[in-house]
Image: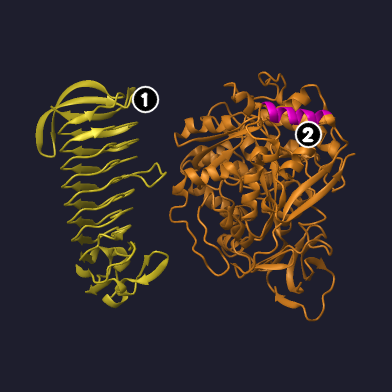
Chain colours: A yellow, B orange
Amino acid sequence: METVTITMKNLPALYLEADNVSPDAFAGKSAAQIADLPVYEGNGTYTLDKYFEVAGNAGATAADTKIIVKGDVSKVKYLGFKISAGEMIIEGNTDLYVGAWMTGGKILAKGNVEAFAATAMKGGELVIEGNAGNYLGAAYRGDWRGMSGGKILVKGNAGSDIGMYMLGGEIVVNGNVDVHVATHAEGGKVIIKGNAKSKVGGQMVEGDIYVFGSIDIMMPGFKPAGEVDLEVEGVKGKFAHFIGDMGERHKKKKGQVIYANLYKKI
Amino acid sequence: MSEYIIKNGHVFDPVQSIKGDKADVAISDGKIVDKVSPSAKVIDAKGKTVMAGAVEIHAHIAGPKVNLGRIYRPEDKLFTCTPTKGMERMGSGNSIPSTFKTGYEYAKMGYTTAMEAAMPPMFSRHVHEEIRDTPIIDEGAFPVFGNNWFVMEYLKNHEVENTAAYIAWMLRATKGYAVKVVNPGGTEAWAWGLNCLTVNDPVPYFDITPAEIVKGLIEANEYLGLPHSMHIHPNNLGNPGCYETTLDTLKLTEGFKAKNKFGREQVMHLTHAQFHSYGGTTWGDFESKAKEITDYVNKNKNITIDTGQVTLDETTTMTADGPFEHHLTGLNHLKWANCDVELETAAGVVPYIYSPNISVCAIQWAIGLEIALMSKDPMRCYITTDHPNAGPFTRYPRVIKWLMSAKSREAQVNAFKHKDKVLAATSLGTLDREISLYELAQMTRAGPAKSLGLAAMCGGLKPGMDADVAVYDFNPEKPVANPDDIEKAFSRCAAVFKCGVKVVENGEIVGTGNKRTLWVNAKVKDNPQVMRDINEKFLKYYSITQANYESLGHHFVPNPFALEVDAT
């Protein structure tokens, strides 16, 4: 695997849209060619090397390419946009849409990420060592097709509306989350090791939510369905089981109505 | 204005019965002429196809429900933006493109005239503001009348003259072009929690049936002698078994004859026939009744139709058939928006994915093609996608490919997941007809122009007509190696002229022309009763005053072109 290191040298005055910073866009290119890739600031189009120092050549394919992003990228959007293979390490905090529409590969964000990370993610792995913003693994604005595969791990806290319209895949948040979890979801799994606030699983059709900590206000559309012993992420324990959202339509499989599940650790 | 001569192209013009002969088309002062001076600019069309600019008879391209679609579907704009380029302003949207993109896309495919198929009269100002912002193409808009309180009250007592006076007032107030009817009575019935699924279901409170509304509007339309006929989206759209309602609707034309000075022969235009040609009782035994519908249409010259071809895309459905959209959101569970328009109409919007893996969608696709291929008179059957309902208009080149190449249809059928079901439920597999370029010119130019009453103006290349000309990089003398070449050739014109102004060159926009708004100015005898009724309804029921209702002046209609009708 070849490694390309890009280091922020000139901070953008506005926010920088760097949707070309991904192993897919870098693949098969030399450092000089990568430096020449377009990025957008405001209504202008510039080259990557206006902002970043580029070192190292990319591999022949995305899978052979590793990108290390260094320096202050807190005003850079779309890092790892549509990544399908390969690896990315983002050392600092970064802005919106990290790993948006990703279908494969691996992104490690060592700092915090802003909203819309892993929008409509289909596969791959996104690890965020800091905190995640709102709409993590959610559908694009207006769309009803959210995250459908892959895995997201947030070691810190996450914002609101995570997993909105989720169809598959897994989101694990080690810390706490804000309101609205897996709203409208029709599949997938969300594990919250800390506390949740309210509107957990609102209008959820299918899928599973696990909360280890507290839930401030339960959704009235979820109905108690007993207690179960589960092993979640290596943690064994007793969970209160709820099914819902009773206000939504639900599929039937073999005569059984399929509800979304909410498990709260007791 | 400059002169042009398009030399040595293969000309297809049904107006002059030219079937691909090599001929020159001369343009001067915005018109097609016999001769131009030697200084005229020469366009070399050797080995290319030359036709008149195409005419769109039915599309939803401007107005509140189109914009509602744009607003509530940001995902339709995702990754579809086109940046500023040369003369082109930026655009966005796929199934509901922005106004500028709409104009450019039509022009690049050789379309120079388009009709907005459903204008809610109360929001005509919005419609005209969008039309104004849609460059190049001439546009008209059809105000909807099928659920209008005035119309229902007049026609209940069979007051045709009053209905005609009201239509004339409405066309003037809204700068409208024709009488559009959507689910007659049904949308109003929906306000009472009901619908009209046959032509005999009474409308609650108004106590009138869809049949009475349709017949009354045909009579009023012919009383006025409007350029276009009554343009209908019948009751019971899109339901299995709906073809019977469609046949009942078509039969309402019996006994009526067209009366107008524009050369129009039909008294009814049945739009998006595909959605109205379904047999079966459920989605399980859903089947095509295209034969029954086209058999009737073939025999009855006072009807024209357009196809409403499903293009197998993700799109946005939108119609003034409010109850249908509510029904649809229950079927596909996607988001629904509704837009009620007081005394006049209502519209719904729901996204839809016509998936080739779903048998119903594949059968719908086949029905649209069956209708086009089973229609014997290409002058009375036009190609549409009921944009954006069955697919975006930008897919016309692909629809043309399917119609011109049996091989491409076969390839698509073979790609369906439920191929056998599609072949069993339709007779597409037995149809080997391939539409010729001459027939294509009839179905997209001369035919719709005649149906709209615009035959003297556009849809042909006869000297004296508007110089709307499209040159396609398609050599009719060469065999088609790959059906995709047809799609490619019809996607981007080599050159397009709109009223003598060059607007497209090598598929790129090079001019924005002199866009006009077409409307119909119908003069009727003074009718104090109707004027009083209008006054009273505005005072009693409308949320706005009459002065804020009408689309007047340069802001709304900067470049009007009125077709004059005198029914005094």
Question: In the rendered structure, which amino acid carries the disc numbered 2?
Answer: Tyr
Residue marked by disc 1: A247
- Chain bearing mark 2: B
Q: Secondary structure at mark 2?
A: helix
Q: Residue at x 51, y 65 (%)?
A: B84
- Chain bearing mark 1: A
Question: In the rendered structure, which amino acid carries the disc numbered 1?
Answer: Gly
- Camera-side mark, 2 or 1: 2
Labels 2 and 1 positioned on one and the same chain: no
User: In the image, is residue B259 above or below residue B465?
Assistant: above
* Residue B10: assigned label: none
Where on the picture, by quarter, is residue B306? top right
Part of the protein shown in magenta: B529-540
Where on the picture, by quarter, is residue B136? bottom right
**Quadrant where the C terminus of chain A is found in the figure:** top left
Q: Residue B160 in the image: state x and y as whole percent.
A: 83, 29
User: In the image, is residue A37 above or below residue B194?
Assistant: below
Residue marked by disc 2: B166
